[in-house]
Image (cartoon, rainbow, N blue to C red):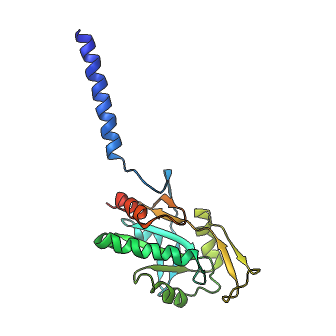
Amino acid sequence: MGRFTGLVVAVLVLALWGLAACASSPSFRGTVLDPPKPIQDFALTDQNGGTFRLGDQQGNVVLLFFGYTFCPDVCPTTLGTWKRVHETLGADAQDVRFVFVTVDPERDTPERLKQHLEAFGSDFIGLTGSPEELQPVYQAFGVYFEKDAETESAAGYLVNHTASTFVIDPEGRWRLKFSFGASDEDIVHDIKQLLP
């Protein structure tokens, strides 16, 4: 009888330990990178002409999106979602960086990025650089882009590009990815799971 009781107690302890472990690990709504991927530091030019370094963002959650200011649909829709995310986060937004990296450095000057992003968020960050500076950043996230000169546009040309939002955790690791069209509720939920 004692041996059976001991076995039951051991099973119960293991079951409770398993439940506690599950309860303590965050559940995300975005696509999870498991294990998280460390991202090498990079430096690009922000919309004020200063230098933005990813390594300086330790302790913050960073949302990265790769787009361009002449984009007619996907980019403004994503930035509109980010605006709602920022508003919903309230005071927590001070620990989140909303970073828009251009895939069209030919037209997206710092001045152009600043003018465009101010319509969505006064503290949104726009980044540009030379093709040589940008290429390693695109490669780190597997970003696809291609100039589409065939499509008629008042902007002159369009750029087909990856439309995901990449989320970097406070330790500087790529942790999550959201596909285009993800809800602001889901993004806010996951950011709050990552905030210290």
Instruction: Give the residue at the far left of this rendering.
Output: 2
In the figure, is residue 110 to the left or right of 145? left
Horizontal and vertical percent for residue 168? 45, 63
Instruction: Give the residue at the far top of this rendering.
Output: 1
Quarter occupied by the N terminus: top left
Instruction: Give the residue at the far right of this rendering.
Output: 150
Residue 143 placement: quadrant: bottom right
Say whether residue 167 is visible. yes
Horizontal and vertical percent for residue 31? 50, 55
Q: Residue at x 54, y 62 (%)?
A: 179
| Front one among 104 and 69 | 69
- Name above or below for residue 6 compared with residue 36: above
Residue 133 placement: quadrant: bottom right
Q: Residue at x 42, y 61 (%)?
A: 186
Q: Residue at x 38, y 70 (%)?
A: 96
Quarter occupied by the C terminus: bottom left
Horizontal and vertical percent for residue 86? 38, 73
| Front one among 99 and 4 | 4
- Name above or below for residue 191 compared with residue 107: above
Horizontal and vertical percent for residue 167? 47, 63
Q: Residue at x 25, y 17 (%)?
A: 6
In the figure, is residue 95 to the left or right of 129? left
